Image (spheres, grey):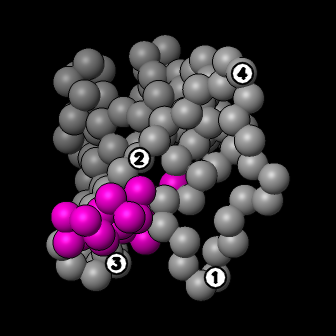
Amino acid sequence: MDQIAKTFQCNLVEGVVSHQIGRFVLEGEKVIPGRLVADTLPPADFEFEENEVYAIDVLVSTGEGKLRDRDARTTVYKRDTSTNYSLKMKTSKAVFSQINHRFPSLPFSLRYVFRCCSLSLSLSLSLS
């Protein structure tokens, strides 16, 4: 991928990896780095096996290919399915229930959660 990006005078963005995916699992065990940097090593003995599916993420930049931190607020979230949550507030339990029902393993936007659940805006203020 790096050779193709350089053909168009672009650079691959650092830190972007492609993942093996499965049913209801977006980030599987096998990972393919998009751009190798000094502190990351290429995967040893990596082979594609039959019936495996991968999501190949390609992000290019005409700049250096490095990400910058911004003051933008995160609006897309993904639930960690390996974590158990013990919520105490009734509103928190209601939101989490809707997230489990509508987005069991896929990413979701806060805007969609508020639209579907018709929750008050005060909840969004407590998340920031």
Identity of the amino acid at label 2? Asp
Q: Please state which of the two labelled residues, at mark 4 or mark 2, is closer to the viewer.
A: 4
Q: Is residue 113 above or below residue 110?
A: above
Which residue sits at x=64%, y=74%?
A: 40
Q: Is residue 98 left or right of residue 9?
A: right
Q: Nearer the viewer, mark 3 or mark 4?
A: 4
How far is disc 2 from disc 3 in space, using C-alphas?
Answer: 16 Å
Q: Which class describes the residues within 10 Å of circle 4: few (<14), some (14-19), or many (20+)?
A: few
Mark 3 or 4 closer to N-term? 4
- Give the distance between the C-alpha atoms of the residues marked 4 and 2, in whole angstroms: 20 Å
Tag 4 secondary structure: loop
Q: Image check: 38 left or right of 69?
A: right
At horizontal 19% and vertical 64% (from top left) the residue drawn is 8
Residues rendered magenta in the picture: 1-17
- Which residue is disc 1 drawn over? 39
Classify mark 1: helix, strand or loop: loop
Q: Give 80 or 85, whichever is nearer the viewer.
A: 80
Residue 66 visible (yes or no): yes
Quadrant of residue 53 within the rendered picture: top right
Q: Which mark is residue 50?
A: 4
Disc nearest the viewer among 4 and 1: 4
Residue 66, labelled with which disc? Answer: 3
* Mark 4 and mark 1: Cα distance apart in space: 30 Å
> Residue placed at 40% from the left, 64% from the top?
2
Q: Residues within 10 Å of mark 3 (few under 14, many from 20)?
A: few
Q: CA distance from mark 3 to mark 1?
A: 14 Å
